[in-house]
Image (cartoon, rainbow, N blue to C red):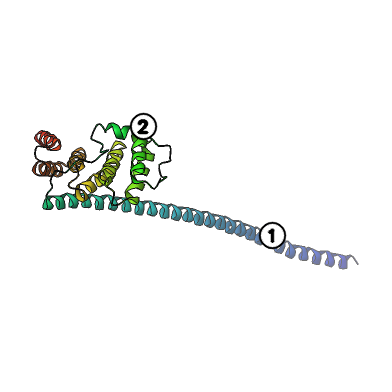
């Protein structure tokens, strides 16, 4: 009996000895699987973060690309406007110009007539009365009396569109040039001054407008172009106040 008991105890010991390494191996596999899962999760989180960063970077790139395209368009518009200005002045030189009868309510470089200064209106800048003279006087009043320069610009822009054949067109465009110049928008100012020079060469405002174009070019450092404009003024408008101003500026360059 004792012998049988010893045999059974020995067999049980062998079974335990065999089972213990198997359990250890199983436990080791579980730990490795857990570690692999953690590594996989970490990689997944990292990949998600990288994808988000890539998406954010792409949005930034798209935004910058749009801004660059906008700036390029604005630059092209400025260059094109400069070309138009120079072309208008050249065309005027080929046509020649003569002095013309004065028109009413024409603003000079520093002053305006008393009649224009006395103009009154309570209508908004973009409101049209349907009366050509009244709308012009309203726009002048916004600039002179009310000092509402942005509204005045809007009013004059509305006027030049609504009354393309008006005798006040040279003055309205001159006003737009002067108002934009006062706001520091020299390219816009040049455009409107050049419009007077090209479209209304017989207007008293033509010589003043061409002088303004030359002054703007000089202020922008374009001395050669300014000289050419001053010389053109002296040739086309000899003995005028604008020609005298051009001579002074030309001698100072």
111 or 28: nearer the eye?
111
Question: Left of 64 or right of it: where is 35?
Answer: right
Which residue does the image show at 30% across and 33% down from the upper left?
115
Which residue does the image show at 17% across and 46% down from the upper left?
202
> Does residue 220 sit above or below 96 in this rendering?
above
Q: Quadrant of the C terminus?
A: top left
In this figure, what is the number of numbered marks? 2
116 or 88: nearer the eye?
116
159 or 194: nearer the eye?
159
76 or 7: nearer the eye?
76
Closer to the N terminus: mark 2 or mark 1? 1
Which residue bears the numbered disc 1?
Answer: 27
Decide if residue 253 is in sight here.
no
Residue 101 x/y as whole percent: 18, 42
> Does residue 219 sit above or below 201 in this rendering?
above
- Helix or strand or loop: what does disc 1 sit on? helix
- Helix or strand or loop: what does disc 2 sit on? loop
| Mark nearer the viewer, 2 or 1 | 2
Question: Left of 231 or right of it: where is 101?
Answer: right
Which residue bears the numbered disc 2?
Answer: 145
């Amino acid at each position: 009996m004792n012998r049988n008991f010893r045999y059974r105890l020995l067999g049980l010991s062998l079974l335990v000895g065999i089972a213990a390494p198997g359990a250890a191996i199983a436990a080791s596999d579980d730990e490795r699987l857990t570690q692999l899962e953690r590594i996989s999760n970490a990689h997944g989180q990292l990949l998600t973060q990288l994808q988000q960063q890539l998406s954010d970077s792409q949005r930034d790139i798209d935004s910058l690309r749009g801004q660059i395209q906008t700036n390029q368009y604005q630059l092209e518009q400025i260059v094109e406007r400069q070309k138009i200005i120079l072309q208008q002045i050249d065309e005027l030189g080929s046509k020649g110009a003569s002095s013309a009868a004065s028109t009413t309510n024409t603003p000079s470089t520093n002053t305006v007539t008393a009649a224009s200064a006395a103009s009154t209106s309570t209508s908004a800048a973009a409101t049209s009365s349907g009366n050509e003279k009244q709308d012009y006087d309203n726009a002048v009043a916004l600039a002179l009396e009310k000092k509402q320069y942005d509204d005045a610009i809007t009013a004059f822009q509305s006027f030049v569109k609504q009354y393309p054949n008006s005798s006040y067109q040279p003055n309205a465009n001159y006003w737009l040039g002067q108002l934009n110049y006062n706001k520091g928008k020299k390219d816009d100012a040049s455009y409107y001054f050049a419009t007077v020079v090209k479209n209304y060469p017989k207007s008293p405002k033509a010589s003043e407008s061409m002088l303004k174009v030359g002054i703007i070019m000089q202020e922008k450092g374009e001395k050669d172009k300014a000289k050419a404009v001053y010389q053109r003024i002296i040739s086309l408008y000899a003995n005028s106040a604008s020609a005298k101003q051009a001579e002074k500026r030309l001698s100072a360059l």
